[in-house]
Image: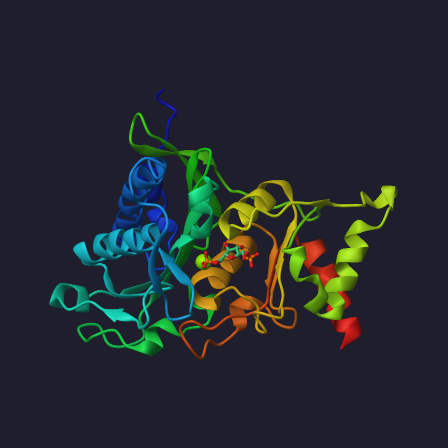
């Protein structure tokens, strides 16, 4: 019992590791932890209350908003606004970035970008979903409203990133640039307990995760990579296993633990890929690099991309280093 380390304790313990050591980032992570517990409670009873299904509206990207998308967005936003560490947020569910109005928020150093409920179309069928978050120091002066440039920073400037997976158990996984740590939620205690310290993705893996229904319009290099995964080469552990949940957080989490690659290239419906650079790709890219893996758009390191708009999409290849190298080689060969 005494060897349990809670997320709160761990964050305080590691505070001195933060590049800009301060209690503010700890408090900010505390807001995320609190909102995650509230959202977790709601998701757990999703089938009972009238909280599944869509609200009959679309977000700015033309995607149907689910009731729980908006619920999660409201809870994370409120939790971040209630403490004084964040001057503004940008969210997949908000058309524009939000600059908090209180002076105490305007005096804060950080902005948070989030996908409050990723994979939400899976909720109605009781499949895992997640929350993804990304934290930057603002570049506008402290004391003033947050501006768009605060949110449009390249991913390598993130000071922290993470996700919550609402799965068969709920976990919070985060990095502040000093390794990746995972905490499993114990609902009876109401706390996240350290369960996966210093997570490292295997350099190689044998799982590939992609929506193959879109195959016909994939770039040629991706088509060739898929065929490579399927070839019978036992000494190379091929054919690989295909696993696709359709919930980025869940697919990423499995591949992080077991070794594998997740791919979302350009498709007929999504010429730039489907996933959002700021809310999905950047935080996952920081996590994977901290865990010893790689993330690329096929040409460049995700964390080096300079964003031009909030809801920008990019092709995304993330996972075990050797697997990402391989798909990149196929993509370059074709160019
Ligand atoms: P969302 O943010 O609207 O939920 O979309 C992102 C999700 C990812 O979780 C998942 O990997 C992907 O969309 C699945 O897309 P598809 O159904 O096209 O395979
Ligand atoms: Mg999403």
Q: Quadrant of residue 59?
A: bottom left
Q: Position of residue 24 (x, y in %)?
A: 25, 55
Give coordinates of residue 28: x percent, y percent.
Answer: 27, 53
- In this view, the residue farthest toward the top is 1
Q: Say left or right for 2 vs 262.
A: left
Q: Give the side of residue 190 with respect to residue 101, left or right.
A: right
Q: Residue at x 27, y 44 (%)?
A: 34
Q: Is residue 173 visible?
A: no
Q: Position of residue 65 (x, y in %)?
A: 37, 59
Most foreground residue, 25 or 62? 62
Q: Is residue 296 above or below residue 248?
A: below
Residue most toward the front? 56
Colour setting: rainbow
Q: Nearer the viewer, residue 293 or 60?
A: 60
Tell me the quarter of the picture where residue 318 sits: bottom right
Q: Quadrant of the N terminus?
A: top left
- Please report the residue visible at 50 percent of the width from the left and 58 percent of the height from the top: 286
């Amino acid at each position: 019992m005494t060897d349990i380390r809670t997320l709160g304790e761990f964050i305080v313990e590691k505070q001195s590791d933060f590049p800009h050591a301060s209690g503010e980032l700890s408090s900010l992570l505390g807001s995320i932890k609190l909102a995650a517990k509230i959202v977790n409670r709601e998701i757990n009873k999703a089938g009972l209350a009238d909280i599944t299904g869509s609200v009959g509206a679309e977000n700015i990207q033309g995607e149907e908003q689910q009731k729980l998308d908006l619920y999660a967005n409201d809870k994370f936003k409120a939790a971040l606004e209630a403490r004084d560490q964040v001057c503004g947020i940008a969210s997949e569910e908000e058309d524009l970035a939000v600059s908090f109005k209180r002076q105490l928020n305007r005096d804060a150093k950080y902005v948070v970008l989030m996908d409050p409920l990723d994979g939400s179309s899976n909720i109605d069928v009781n499949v895992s979903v997640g929350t993804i978050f990304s934290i930057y120091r603002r570049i506008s002066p402290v004391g003033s409203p947050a501006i768009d440039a605060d949110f449009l920073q390249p991913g390598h400037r993130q000071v922290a990133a993470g996700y919550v997976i609402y799965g068969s158990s709920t976990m919070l996984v985060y990095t502040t640039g000093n390794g990746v740590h995972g905490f499993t939620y114990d609902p009876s205690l109401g706390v996240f307990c350290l369960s996966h310290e210093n997570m490292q993705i295997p350099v190689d893996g044998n799982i590939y995760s992609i929506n193959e229904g879109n195959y016909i319009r994939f770039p040629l290099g991706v088509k060739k990579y898929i065929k490579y995964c399927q070839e019978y080469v036992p000494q190379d552990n091929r054919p690989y296993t295909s696993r696709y949940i359709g919930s980025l957080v869940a697919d990423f989490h499995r591949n992080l633990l077991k070794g594998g690659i997740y791919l979302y290239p350009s498709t007929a419906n999504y010429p730039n890929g489907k996933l959002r650079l700021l809310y999905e790709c950047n935080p996952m890219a920081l996590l994977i690099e901290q865990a010893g893996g790689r993330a690329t758009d096929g040409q460049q390191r995700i964390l080096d991309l300079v964003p031009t708009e909030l809801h920008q999409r990019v092709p995304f290849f993330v996972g075990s280093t050797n697997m990402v190298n391989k798909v990149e080689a196929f993509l370059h060969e074709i160019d």
